[in-house]
Every structure is written in C-alpha cells, then in structure tokens.
Amino acid sequence: MDGTYFWMLGIAASFCVGLSKGGLPAFGMLGVPLLSLVISPVAAAGLLLPVFIFSDIFGVWAYRKEFDRNVLRIAVPGILMGGLIGWLTASIVPEQFVRFLIGLIGAIFAMSLLMRRQINSTPRKATWGKGLFWTSIAGFTSFVSHAGAPPWQIWVLPLGLSKLAFAGTTTIIFAIMNVSKIVPYYFLGQLEMQNLQVAALLFLPAVVAVFIGYRLVKVMPDRVFFLIVAWALLLVSAKLIWDGVFG
C-alpha cells in the first residue's frame, strides 16, 4: 500500500469522504469506487470506515444545531435494521448486484428530480412506513459498500427540509450508521491493524474537506445546492450501475 498511485487515490477518496461530512453526501459514495481502482472493494470499504468515523466527529460538531429531530427519530431504527441485515447476509449477497440495484434506483430518482423539478414541489410529511423502508435499504447498502446516499435521498429530498437541515440530518444519521459498522466489520475481518495505520494518514485531508464542504453549503444558494445534490446522485448512481455490470 505504499505506491504513489494508491496514495493519490487514497487522498482523493478521503477528501470525498470529508466533503460528504461537510454536507455534500453524494461525494462520500465516490470513496470506495476510487480506492477500488487499486485494491478490492471489500478492502477499500474496511480501510475507509475509520476515515468516515473520524470525519463524522467534525461533521456532527459543525451541524450540531442544524437537523430535523422527527426525521432522525424515524431514520435511526431503519438504518440500524438495514445494517443488521447487511451483516447477516454479507457472505451471500453479491456486492455487484447491490451496487447495480441501488445505482438503478438512484439514477431513476435523480432523473425524476431533474425532469419534474420535484425539488421545488410541495414538501411531503415524514412518515414511518416510507421512512423505515428507505432507511433500512440505506443502512443495508451503506453496510455493504458505503453506498447509502441514494435510498436515503429518495426519502429525504421530497420532505422539503431546508438546505442546512438536510445537510445536518444527513451528516448525523450517517455518523450513527458508520459507528454501528465497527463491530460487524471487525468480526468480518475488515478492520485490520494495517488498514487502521493507513487510514490514520488519510485523516487530515478528510478533516480539511469537512470544513470546505460545510463552508460551501453555507454560502451556496438553496436551489443550486439541491441541483448539485441531484446531479451528483445521478453521476454516482451511473458509476454504481457501471460497476455492477462490468466491475
């Protein structure tokens, strides 16, 4: 793991993780695909988990006053349930199939947002039925390959949260999601000492990116912010579909 190419991609991946914790969630999904260019996706997911968790500390602190309690109350049981399913089925569910499926769902939703302009539509109420369904899927796909953003956004974007509330709620829920992975990842052999040592060297670019992302969210107009989220979701979903078919 000492090649120049690896470290270039590792820094880029950790920077994307930090941006996601700063309030641009779709960027976090780029981390594993970037590192998968030089190591296996399973190894990449394990290596980046400490980076996600370390970045979460700063992201949660930045958004400690900006979140929606009702959305969190519904989402926490869902993401924990989805993570448990991911743990129990880790050895039998092909990762490529998960990537393709979640990429397809995310792409359809992103195109719907862009074509119908649902970003400015009448906000929907956060309900337990849809909330538990989509957050459990988000918990599952996040456990498998840190790809929980598409199903999460499918549920949360139509709720009409403010820009900061959306970013803060997303940051907090993914922090909870990542902490819940520690024990399962350890027992699955994805948290090896060598990975932890490498991850420690990637903390700095991730933390810098957290505050860059937070600043961008603060100054960016609401419509521009949500359009970027929708386009980022579409591009990441396309990458997941590609990986699922040809990976």
Image (spheres, grey):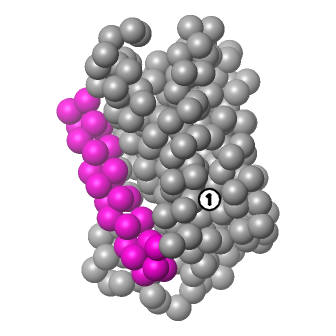
Q: Residue at x 36, y 84 (%)?
A: 117
Left/right of residue 42 with respect to residue 40 in the rendered view: right
Q: Residue furthest left?
A: 246
The residue closer to the viewer here, 236 or 137, is: 236
Q: Which residues are magenta?
A: 220-247
Give x and y (percent) for residue 238: 27, 51
Q: Residue at x 25, y 30 (%)?
A: 247
Q: What secondary structure is marked by label 1?
A: helix
Left/right of residue 113 with respect to residue 125 in the rendered view: left
**What amino acid type should be assigned to the residue bearing mark 1?**
Thr
Q: Residue at x 56, y 32 (%)?
A: 204
> In the image, is residue 77 part of the stretch drawn in magenta?
no
* Res 45 visible: yes
Q: Residue at x 57, y 59 (%)?
A: 214
Give x and y (percent) for residue 41: 40, 25
Query: Would you call the spot at circle 1 few (<14 residues within 10 Å), some (14-19), or many (20 or more)?
Result: many
The residue closer to the viewer here, 209 or 86, is: 209
* Res 148 visible: no
The residue closer to the viewer here, 143 or 169, is: 169
Main secondary structure found in the magenta portion: helix
Task: Look at the picture and state if 56 lies above or below 94.
Answer: below
Task: Look at the picture and state if 119 lies above or below 241.
Answer: below
Give x and y (percent) for residue 82: 63, 44
Q: According to the image, label 1 marks what residue? A: 170
